[in-house]
Amino acid sequence: MEKVIIYTTAEEIAQALIIMLEKYSVSQPIPSFQDEKMTVGEGANFIDVSYPTILKWITQNKIRVHGKGRTRFLLRSELIHDYKNLK
């Protein structure tokens, strides 16, 4: 049988919540920016579409792109999110 504890004061409840959060929370690793960054061509290969297609979606603002001119790049997480919302 599981032990049941009844907290009666606000301080006890707050301490119990802190303990429970520390015990059961799972921290997500923070992705490295360099792991996320990819060129437009790499992004096209990643989602298996042609280079002209991904350029069309970028000009239509359906896919987010960062940078200017020849230094444009995509973020993997944003590309996945935007591609899912295309369909």
Image (spheres, rainbow, N blue to C red):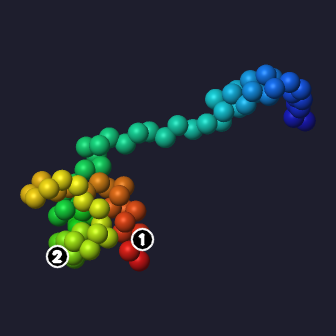
Q: Secondary structure at mark 2?
A: helix
Dividing the image into 4 quarters, which one contains the C terminus?
bottom left
13 relative to 23 in the view: left or right: right
Q: Is residue 67 above or below residue 64?
A: above
Q: Which corner quadrant of the image does residue 2 belong to?
A: top right
- Residue 6, image quadrant: top right
**Relative side of 32 to 87, left or right:** left
Answer above or below: position of 56 versus 75.
Answer: below
Circle 1 sits in a helix, a strand or a loop, which is it? helix
Residue type pointed to by label 1: Asn
| Lateral position of residue 74 relative to residue 4, left or right | left
Query: What amino acid type should be assigned to the residue bearing mark 2?
Result: Pro
Residue 57 at least partly seen: no
Instruction: Please tell me which residue is depicted at 41% across the width and 39% down the height of the picture.
Output: 30
Residue 58 in which image quadrant:
bottom left
Are discs 1 and 2 less than 8 Å apart at CB? no
Crowd around label 2: few <14 · some 14–19 · many ≥20 (10 Å): few
Relative horizontal placement of residue 38, taking residue 18 as reference (left or right): left
Percent of width and height locating residue 51: 17, 72
Residue 67: x percent and y percent? Answer: 18, 53
Q: Which residue is mark 2?
A: 52
Foreground residue, 28 or 10? 10
Q: Cα distance, mark 1 to mark 2? A: 19 Å
Of the 4 image quadrants, the one containing the N terminus is: top right
Q: Which badge, 1 or 2, comes first in the chain's sequence?
A: 2
Which residue is rendered at x = 9% and y = 57% of the image? 70
Q: Residues within 10 Å of mark 1 (few under 14, many from 20)?
A: few
Q: How many marks?
A: 2
Looking at the image, can residue 29 be seen? yes
Residue 33 drawn at (x, y percent): 29, 43
- Residue position marked by numbered label 1 in the rendering: 85
Q: Position of residue 76 (x, y in %)?
A: 32, 55
